């Protein structure tokens, strides 16, 4: 019969197993919340991760924009939220395009702003072509191509805003700063999800 004895003078280090158990528990909680739908926890975790990875992405904007879409409530995972996010980008691109067209039609813009607005109109005409391609690539799990198409769409907001700042001598103020900023944030969310899946 073997008898196992312990040395009372020898200290046993239990911190490693406890650390491992707590790490496993945290991972379990995170993974478990990703599987139970976007009841706020999934969106909150996604936006926290996304805003940590990309300092330009605003956590509050991310949560508000995803939570505002009723389709996100039954979403079960990042893939579903990714498609929802991209479709939100598409809707916003079309809305901004219409807004710019209306400004040009009204003819109330500063004359020096007209070429910038026309450029922005072209840019926001291209974005609705890129986004559906990004959605299809994303669904096909071709995340690299989805990233390229979403990045091309994102460029519309940056290039549009840059057009106004480049005409410094005219002291132009962009009438699209809010729209461009919102579109940039929406595309940043989609890109963050694409990089997470």
Image (cartoon, helix red, strand yellow):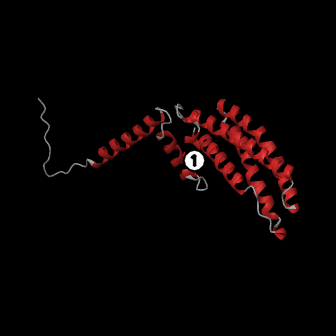
Q: x and y percent of residue 188 in the render?
A: 64, 48
> Which of 12/186 is in front?
186
Q: Which residue is drawn at 70% across and 31% down?
A: 136
Q: x and y percent of residue 109 in the render?
A: 84, 58
From the viewer's perspective, tell me whether residue 165 is left or right of residue 33.
right
Q: Which residue is drawn at 76% across and 49% down?
A: 156
Report the label total: 1
> Which of 148/97 is in front?
97
Image quadrant where residue 128 sits: top right
View extreme (bottom): residue = 169
> Which of 102/153 is in front?
102
Crowding at mark 1 (Cα within 10 Å: few <14, some 14-19, many 20+):
many
Which quadrant would the C terminus be assigned to in this image?
top right
Q: x and y percent of residue 80 in the render?
A: 58, 32
Q: Name the residue under label 1.
A: 62
> Which of 28/100 is in front?
100
Circle 1: element type: helix
Placement of 24 over or under 15, stated as above or below: above
Q: Residue at x 77, y 47 (%)?
A: 99
Q: x and y percent of residue 69 in the render?
A: 59, 38
Q: Residue at x 18, y 51 (%)?
A: 10
Image quadrant where residue 194 sits: top right
């Amino acid at each position: 019969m073997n008898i196992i004895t312990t040395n009372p003078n020898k200290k046993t280090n239990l911190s490693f197993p406890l650390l491992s158990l707590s790490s496993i528990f945290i991972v379990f909680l995170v993974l478990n919340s990703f599987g139970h739908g976007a009841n706020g926890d999934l969106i909150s975790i996604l936006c926290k991760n996304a805003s940590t990875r990309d300092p330009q992405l605003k956590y509050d904007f991310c949560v508000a924009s995803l939570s505002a879409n009723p389709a996100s409530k039954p979403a079960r995972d990042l893939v579903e939220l990714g498609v929802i996010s991209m479709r939100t980008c598409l809707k916003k691109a079309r809305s901004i395009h219409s807004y710019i067209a209306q400004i040009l039609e009204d003819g109330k813009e500063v004359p020096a702003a007209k070429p910038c607005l026309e450029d922005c109109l072209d840019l926001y005409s291209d974005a609705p072509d890129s986004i559906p391609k990004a959605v299809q690539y994303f669904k096909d799990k071709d995340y690299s191509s989805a990233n390229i198409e979403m990045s091309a769409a994102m460029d519309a907001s940056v290039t549009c805003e840059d057009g106004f700042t480049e005409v410094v001598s005219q002291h132009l103020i962009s009438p699209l700063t809010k729209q461009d900023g919102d579109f940039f944030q929406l595309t940043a969310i989609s890109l963050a999800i694409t990089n997470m899946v």
